Image: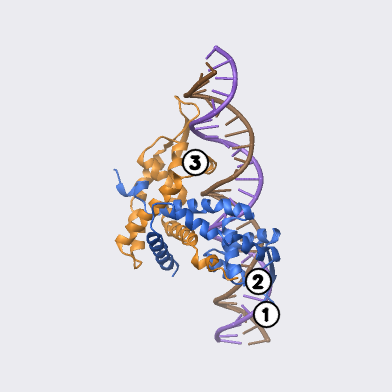
Chain colours: A orange, B blue, C brown, D purple
Amino acid sequence: MTYEQLKLENQLCFPFYAASRLITREYQPFLDKLGITYPQYLTLLILWEEDGKAVNDIAKKLLLNTNTITPLLKRMEKQGLIKRERSGTDERKVLVHLTEAGAQMKEEAASIPQELAKRLLDSNMEVNDLIKLKDNLGAIISFLTK
Amino acid sequence: MTYEQLKLENQLCFPFYAASRLITREYQPFLDKLGITYPQYLTLLILWEEDGKAVNDIAKKLLLNTNTITPLLKRMEKQGLIKRERSGTDERKVLVHLTEAGAQMKEEAASIPQELAKRLLDSNMEVNDLIKLKDNLGAIISFLTK
DNA sequence: TATCTTTATATCGTTTACGATATAATTGCA
DNA sequence: TGCAATTATATCGTAAACGATATAAAGATA
């Protein structure tokens, strides 16, 4: 049997998988300068927006579990980007705070989004297509997370 | 500074990263039945389409390097899904062949694509949007790989 | 022919992802 | 109050990803 639907080219899933990795690779040169990885960058984005979040809040935002986030945060702590401390009001929670170094990295990272946007717009894609793409991905994400 | 562009919500990158993982999770129950992982499934798709490919051919199709593919293939070999053997005409190449078990898994996997498509169409998304999405992802991929 | 370059795989080390499970603090409720 | 559920984190094991590097075969070229 041929099974057209089983050809890699006909898979809907593969483009998601491939695009995700390729885009992460595009970030690599910029993140290398800062000495951080892509998930670490995402974690910093959250903390730059609001410092002192609990481990679980970060995990939920990134759609990850603590078995991924906990070791990641430990590495970031060892690098001196964040501090982790038990909450006083709820001893179960561990609150994550930026260090001075972690907070300052924000300035250095400020140009990354534009650099990436610029790069992606170098493709033949229209800005509108890119926005539509983001919206459609958002729709899938909210469907698959509810 | 607020740096609107640094908010997670405003990132173009995050939806790719999140959607990719969420979609892989949707495959999980189906792949669990077969006892394989998502990248292993993608590898089988390639071999079901054309058996006897070289390691590098598979790697190129999946946009991976041999440092990912080689251990993956070894695990698949240990599971009895494939065999690896040096090419006779070019001793550098290792050709990957399906075993009987690997070939037969195709029948069991045949329904997976429809199951997933069904699931994704349960979202509010139009078929046309989904197709457009696939095309746009394809455009980004071909841009980022050339 | 000698050797330099390219091609094809593999190995090593580090960092994600994630299922399964453990542990401790807090909450809810009989 | 007492104790069963829930919540929050962490740990363990396995499988990707991927940068850097190694090794060997094949091809190119002086």
The residue shown at (30%, 47%) is B4
Q: Is residue A25 above or below residue A40?
A: below
- Which dot marks residue B89? 1
Gap in angstroms between the C-alphas marked 3 and 2:
41 Å
Gap in angstroms between the C-alphas marked 1 and 3:
50 Å
Specify the quadrant of the image occupied by residue B95.
Answer: bottom right
Do the residues at pointers 1 and 3 share their chain?
no
Q: Quadrant of the N terminus of chain B?
A: top left
Q: Earlier in the sequence, mark 2 or mark 1?
A: 1
- Subunit ID for the residue under disc 1: B
Closer to viewer: mark 1 or mark 3: 1
Q: Position of residue B105 (x, y in %)?
A: 64, 62
Do the residues at pointers 3 and 2 share their chain?
no
- Subunit ID for the residue under disc 2: B
Q: Which residue is mark 3?
A: A73
Q: Which residue is mark 2?
A: B95
Left or right of A72 on screen, residue B123 = left
Amino acid beneath label 1: Thr
**Is label 2 in a helix, a strand or a loop?**
strand
Q: Position of residue A127 (x, y in %)?
A: 30, 61
**Is label 3 in a helix, a strand or a loop?**
helix
Q: Position of residue B82 (x, y in %)?
A: 67, 65
- Which dot marks residue B38? none
**Is label 1 in a helix, a strand or a loop?**
loop
Amino acid beneath label 3: Leu
How crowded pointer 2 is (Cα within 10 Å; few <14, some 14-19, many 20+) is rated as: some
* Residue sitting nearer the eye, A94 or A143: A143
The residue shown at (59%, 63%) is B43
Q: Quadrant of the C terminus of chain B?
A: bottom left
- Subunit ID for the residue under disc 3: A
Q: Is residue B134 above or below residue D3?
A: below
